[in-house]
Image: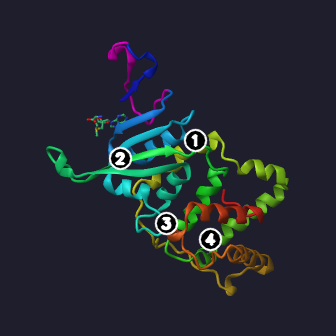
Amino acid sequence: MVLEFNRRFQGTPLSSRLKVIQGDVLKCDLPYFDICVANIPYQISSPLTFKLLSHRPIFRCAVIMFQHEFAMRLVAKAGDSLYCRLSVNVQLLSRVSHLIKVGRNNFRPPPKVDSSVVRIKPRKPLPSVSFKEWDGLVRLCFNRKNKTLGSIFKQKKVLALLEKNYKTMQSLQLTSDAETSEEKMSEDDVALLAHMVDDLNMETSDEKDDDEMEMDDADIVGEGRAFFKEKMMGILQQGDFAEKRASKLSQVDFLYLLSLFNKTGIHFS
Ligand SMILES: C[S@@+](CC[C@H](N)C(=O)[O-])C[C@H]1O[C@@H](n2cnc3c(N)ncnc32)[C@H](O)[C@@H]1O
């Protein structure tokens, strides 16, 4: 259920200023709002956060109660143990502050988890970046957030994927103008967020046990692949990123890294 409180009709009875919208907040079209105050069911924390951040015109401020651990991920900074893809993505689009912890014993009966109230203020203007590109890079880096970027970008699957993207982009022969316009974050682009966040909710895992392995020279098929690997390593070294880990990189670091890749024709979407 969504309650819309309209300030334009100040002085009129509360009942005529309140509109009740009954339905699933994730499915309904939200009305214009500038402030959102919500005590939400915690299982929709991530999709609701990104739905709000993709709503236009963008709101001024949201004050929302989340499960404590989710809230700590939202506000985590580079270097904090809870810093993750959720932190980076939400903080790309907004400034998030932890307001107050609400312990479980404040409720009767006490729930199983603690809560926290968080303030979210969207950044204005939004950073000029394609969110698909951004999330592609961040997703790769946080798949193994404590590994160095040098070792992440030497993995077979990663190299193969990026080389494929690179060749596709080359074959499309995009002009530099077209590339520039693609890098801007459009409203549609942000709206994609709502569909990209299912796995962001309470992600905790760092190490995945899939079969991704670093590519050694024996794996390199032909000179083209070796050349591409050199190109990748050159970009990482140029920005002094090869020995750094995602868990320690700020939004500014990721934006810089993405710009280095994009300038060299390497794309993540
Ligand atoms: C934590 S309770 C808060 C209730 C009330 N707002 C309060 O502060 O006391 C969350 C409420 O959201 C409702 N809810 C659950 N999923 C929802 C959804 N997808 N869309 C809208 N409301 C939902 C639940 O029925 C529940 O009443």
Q: Is residue 45 above or below residue 258?
A: above
Look at the numbered discs 1 and 4 and tell me whether their residues touch, using CB distance below 8 Å: no
Q: Earlier in the sequence, mark 1 or mark 4?
A: 4
Q: Which mark lies nearer to you, 1 or 4? A: 1
Residue 24 belongs to the span the image colors magenta? yes
Q: Any atom of ligand 1 within 8 Å of the CB at mark 2?
A: yes
Query: Residue 219 at what x, y percent from top left?
Result: 67, 82
Q: Mark 2 is on which residue type?
A: Gln
Nearest to the observer: residue 91 or residue 203:
91
Gap between marks 3 and 4, in whole Å? Answer: 26 Å
Q: Residues within 10 Å of mark 2 (few under 14, many from 20)?
A: few
Nearest to the observer: residue 8 or residue 177:
8
Q: Mark 4 is on which residue type?
A: Lys
Question: Which residue bears the numbered disc 3?
Answer: 78
Q: Earlier in the sequence, mark 2 or mark 1?
A: 2
Considering the image in quadrants, where does the N terminus appear?
top left
* Residue furthest left as drawn: 109
**Magenta-colored span:** 12-31
83 displayed left or right of 124? left
**Element type where label 1 sits in the image:** helix
Query: Residue 124 at what x, y percent from top left?
Result: 59, 43
Question: Which residue bears the numbered disc 1?
Answer: 191
**Element type where label 4 sits in the image:** helix
Question: Which residue bears the numbered disc 2?
Answer: 43
Judged from the image, the quadrant occupied by ligand 1 is top left
